[in-house]
Amino acid sequence: MLDNIKIVHHQGKQFIPDVTTAKVPGIFRGRPVISLEKVDETKLQSICPTGAISLKPVSIDLGKCTFCGECANQFPDKIKFTTDYKISTNEREGLIIKEGEDKTVEVNPEKVREEIRRLFGRSLKLRQISAGGDNSCEWELNAANNVQFDMSRFGIEFVASPRHADGIVITGPVTENMAEPVQICYDATPDPKIIVLVGTDAISGGIFAGSPAINRSFLDKYTIDLYIPGNPAHPLTIINGLLDLTRKK
Ligand code: SF4
């Protein structure tokens, strides 16, 4: 009995009381900040494996970035990754971080469909589709519902059938073989429905972009309601993104 009490005392509370202000360890790579320091920009651009770095001005596209950290390793005075995990947005261009700017990535409330906050503000059921994913973002989506992050306390949960869902969450670059299942799943979800892309592969194709093995035509047909970047996305990025999309501040 005494041993059990000691274990409980040692472990403390397992859940994060406030997922909107929780701190993450310093090694975490979240929103980058790019300084105005002059560097060999051509070399900087060439080290990025996914073409996430653009020039004039120097910028990083979080929708393409794998968060490998190599640019920051080789050009520490130019690029630093902060621990800011709130990097989800409903605007694709909002994922582009430019040099000389240190502003947060946010959901633009003006672009959130009216029915999203009216209908999903207290309860949101999602069907997850792994469209050629490597199980990393899928793992983090699972983690978002574990005892520590406990996303279901906000009424946000995953369901087995698209017919019971309010929207779909896509992970992976959308392989040719998954293009039709993604469409079928979307069609089976009742209106109004949202589309959420989680992770670099889903947002841009990541390291698979341009491969003949992927078919991203589905994503060209519909408005994406939320981009959640990361490689994989962190549970705190996932939860805060979904809360910002569905709830008024
Ligand atoms: S951290 Fe991102 S931007 Fe930097 S080299 Fe890696 S993929 Fe490219």
Image (tube, grey):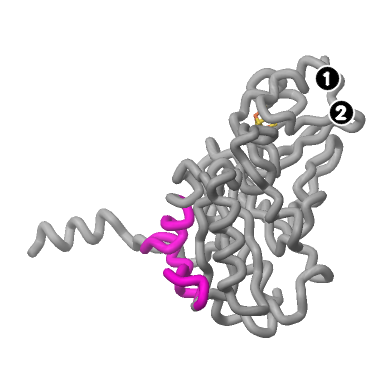
Determine the quadrant in which ligand 1 lies: top right
Q: Is residue 163 left or right of residue 230?
A: left
If you read the primary sequence from the N terminus, does the residue marked by circle 1 or circle 2 appear first? 1
Amino acid carrying label 2: it is: Leu
Amino acid carrying label 1: it is: Glu
Callout 1–callout 2 Cβ contact below 8 Å = yes
Residue at (53, 62) in percent of width and height: 19
Which quadrant would the N terminus be assigned to in this image?
bottom left
Look at mark 2 in the image and give the residue it sits on.
55
User: Looking at the image, which is closer to me, 237 or 177?
Assistant: 177
Residue at (75, 54) in percent of width and height: 220
Residue at (50, 52) in percent of width and height: 130
| Residue located farthest toward the left when viewing the structure as drawn | 1
> Which residues make up the magenta segment?
140-163
Alpha-carbon neighbours of circle 1 within 10 Å: few (<14), some, or many (≥20)?
Answer: some
| Residue located farthest toward the bottom when viewing the structure as drawn | 118
Coordinates of residue 199 in the picture (x, y in percent): 59, 47
36 lies above or below 84: above
Residue at (61, 50) in percent of width and height: 85
Label of residue 41 in the image: 1
134 lies above or below 69: below
Label of residue 81 in the image: none
